[in-house]
Image: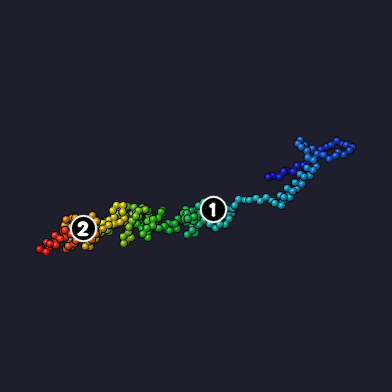
Amino acid sequence: MASPRPSFSQPTKTPPSSTPSPPGPIPIPGGGVPLNMREVEELERMTKDFIKDMDTHAPVITSPPTEVCGKCGEALSRTQPAVRAMDKLFHSNCFCCMSCHRPLQGMQFYDRDGSPQCEDCYMSSLAVCSRCGEKITDRVLKAVGQCFHAHCFRCSTCSCTLEGAPFITDDNNNPYCVQDYHRRFSPLCVSCNEPIIPAAGSEETVRVVALDKNFHLKCYRCEDCARPLSIEADENGCYPLDGRILCMKCHTQRAKQAAQ
């Protein structure tokens, strides 16, 4: 709250009188309510207190914060040149490559996590794609212990992109889509000569092994009558004879013929 500004009474001419006038209100030029002597003395006291308080408690004047260098953290002088880059200010000799420390003022640079890097150092630091052998200047896809362009990480058989898709690698770390891996490396069914792979929408491979031969479950049948065989050890299961996969009935018939 602002303190009242001091006011001072102005001298006025009074008509001569043989008898002094008793003390009374002092008129104020320009109109208004006149002050009596007591009010004038109170006003003067308040004015002196205000001036004394101003001398004792001088107002604090805050200046805007000084700009500091984005590298060394020291203050920037208004008389020295500075470099503005990456939304920061730098001393001209502080704005240098994070790797080789060459000055970068007026030169092309790359922002590496908030630090500047010259073009030569940036290019030297880039990973090399394991498929095409070119530098990776955009997003790096890391898989099977190697680096790839996202568009270069593909199935070794059908070349479909494997980014974000399930894949399987062979013994040489070559990636394959799930379908091609099973087509290439899954065992073949001795009955239909097709690879035994998971059913559509499944990751589980179901195969039947009998007499060291591989079968699809649907292909596991008697070699003589083509009757489906059970994988359980029961009367509907396999009764092999002379290396053949037979049902119990066909097994019995062949055994009788061999005995004659």
Between 80 and 31, which is closer to the camera in this rendering? 31
Residue 18 visible in the picture: yes
Secondary element type, mark 2: loop
Between 126 and 215, which is closer to the camera in this rendering? 215
Expressed as whole percent of the image width and height from the top left, the position of residue 91 reads: 55, 55
Between 115 and 184, which is closer to the camera in this rendering? 184
Tell me the quarter of the picture where residue 139 sits: bottom left
Q: Residue at x 18, y 57 (%)?
A: 222
Q: Residue at x 48, y 53 (%)?
A: 107
Expressed as whole percent of the image width and height from the top left, the position of residue 85 reads: 51, 52
Expressed as whole percent of the image width and height from the top left, the position of residue 99 reads: 47, 59
Q: Are marks 1 and 2 in contact (CB under 8 Å)?
A: no
Q: Which residue is mark 2?
A: 236
* Left or right of 159, for residue 48: right
Q: CA distance from mark 1 to mark 2?
A: 85 Å
Secondary element type, mark 1: strand
